[in-house]
Amino acid sequence: MNCRRHSGLVLALFLSLLLHFSVVISPGWYGDNKEDEPSTVLDARLVAVPAAPLPSSPPRAKKVLIPKIAPEVVQDSAPVLTQDTPSAVPEAATDPVPQAATSLATEPEPAEVVPSLPRHGRIQFAISRGDGGFVVGKSVHEWSHDGKRYNLSASSETTGLAALFKAVRVIQTSEGFFVQGDLKPASFRYDQGNGVVETADFDWDAHQVKMSNGLSFPVGDGAEDIVSMFYQLIQAAQRGEGFVMGVTTGKKLERYVFDWLEEDVLELKPGRFHAWHVRIRSVSGGADVTDVWLGREVAGLPIRIRHIDRKGEIFDQRAEIIDYEGK
């Protein structure tokens, strides 16, 4: 009798784990925890800087909106002669009149910035429920780029005993290009593995993102999707700035605040890492919070992603395998 009761409890526990896992299995779970909310145009953007060695001291937490700054126009100091300007030389003079500069200084072409993201790589995460809890699945991030265009994917699935009860597999992909070293997505796709596919297409000329559900939202420069977001964070880590970013999940657009916390030391399966700690929370003030750690020893790539949903459930992704070009 006790054996039957124990078996029933184990089965109930696994079913509960699978129910939560099917909701949060992908890196973008926290984007769907709240009702859709209207979004406004995001004026802030990440200003690209040339790739530089990562700072040795931890960045302080700030909340900084980075506005666009119009380029300063510099006028030549020499006077400009026009048809309305009387000549300083008499008409009888035979020497030619020296011509002053008549045009404004032109803005130089911006130098090309090499993306800090390695050209290709792969990170495999173990997904557990709770801090140090039971492992219920894995997530694999893969990417490649040529310095101009990129392709990112994140596939997540149940593993081990959890997979015996219910096999779950979801895939998210992001494609786009680089502008001054920053990721600028063109399209995002979220395949839930059950026949449901959600997409988002960016129209940067119109500054809009259109969802497959028919909704459209205005976006400003610096907006990302739920996958490219993780690989854009290192650009801000080098500056130690907090900022606001518009992020789409393929279902809606949400605005998130990114706060830089104190540097941490993580002991993971691949080794010991010094990592920047970034906290992500919605502007609307939702209860769900996501923490991301970027490893200094591995080009600022995400090595841990921990999410607490609005019900207080914890889902933790920790890197088990990190492999990329140049490592």
Image (spheres, rainbow, N blue to C red):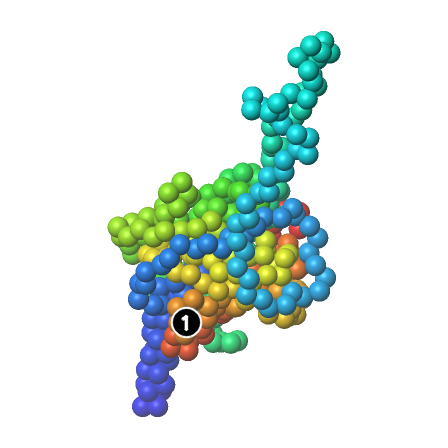
Q: Is residue 142 above or below residue 292?
A: above
Front residue of 93/23: it is: 93
The residue lying furthest to the bottom in this view is 2
Is residue 108 visible in this depiction of the protein?
Answer: no
Q: Is residue 263 above or below residue 99?
A: below
Q: Name the residue tied to disc 1.
A: 285
Front residue of 72/276: it is: 72
Residue 38 picture location, percent across and down: 32, 60
Q: Amino acid at mark 1?
A: Gly
Is 164 on the left or on the right of 294, as rendered? left
Is 259 on the left or on the right of 218, as rendered? right
Instruction: Residue 165: name its quadrant.
Output: bottom left
SS class, disc 1: loop
The N terminus lies in quadrant: bottom left
Is residue 9 visible in this depiction of the protein?
Answer: yes
Q: Residues within 10 Å of mark 1 (few under 14, many from 20)?
A: few
Residue 225 picture location, percent across and down: 43, 53
Residue 157 picture location, percent across and down: 41, 60
